[in-house]
Image: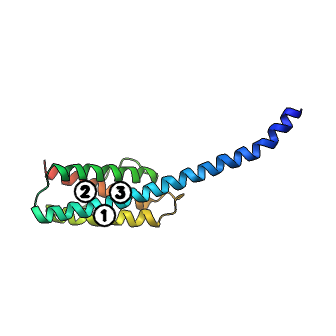
Amino acid sequence: SAADEEHSKQSPGREEMLKNLEVKRREIAYKENIDRAKEGAALGAELRQTYERYKTIGSAEQKKLGRLEKLARSIREDAGGDDDKEGLKEVPADPSASFVQLQKLSEELQTKVEKTPRHVVSTSVINTANRLLGLIRHIRSSFK
């Protein structure tokens, strides 16, 4: 019928438009993930500096740890991972070492997120995020 013919003429344009929207959505999500990783690395560095200066953390740092945890979870989910059962394999010897490792892992996560193409499921990103989350839990339990 004429209506079917008219519909088939419109479909390719509509499908193309939907495909383009999906590509744009993925690009935005990818950029947001890179921004999360950058913010996480900055928080890791700030937390280490604060701990090294004061040898303790206060409520502001607890909030930053919470934010870093949220960022790491979002990055892990975006990479196709979910809740980890393992956590940390090796617990740092003391709080100072924990904060050094926190900075290192948050920077490593940023590097891996930036190097991973946006359509790739990265076990490397997931594993690093899981190690970071385990370390955050360890630090939080040390400062209760």
Q: Residues within 10 Å of mark 2 (few under 14, many from 20)?
A: many
**Mark closest to the chain's N terminus, 3 or 1:** 1
**Quadrant of the rendering where the N terminus is positioned:** top right
Q: Amino acid at mark 3?
A: Ala
Q: Secondary structure at mark 3?
A: helix
Could you tell me if the residues under marks 2 and 1 are in contact, i.e. CB atoms within 8 Å?
Answer: yes
Residue 18, given in percent of the width and then of the height, sits at: 65, 46
Q: Secondary structure at mark 2?
A: helix
Q: Residues within 10 Å of mark 3 (few under 14, many from 20)?
A: many
- The CA span between labels 3 and 2 is 10 Å
Q: Which mark is residue 105?
A: 1
Q: Amino acid at mark 1?
A: Leu
- The CA span between labels 3 and 1 is 8 Å
Question: Which residue carries the number 2 mark?
Answer: 135
Residue 45, given in percent of the width and then of the height, sits at: 25, 64
Could you tell me if the residues under marks 3 and 2 are in contact, i.e. CB atoms within 8 Å?
Answer: no
Dividing the picture into quadrants, the one containing residue 123 is bottom left
Residue furthest left in the image: 55
Residue furthest right in the image: 1
Residue 127, given in percent of the width and then of the height, sits at: 37, 58
Total label count? 3
Q: Secondary structure at mark 1?
A: helix
**Mark closest to the chain's N terminus, 2 or 1:** 1
Residue 47, given in percent of the width and then of the height, sits at: 21, 60
Could you tell me if the residues under marks 3 and 1 are in contact, i.e. CB atoms within 8 Å?
Answer: no
Q: Amino acid at mark 2?
A: Leu
Q: Residue at x 25, y 56 (%)?
A: 135
Question: Which residue carries the number 3 mark?
Answer: 129
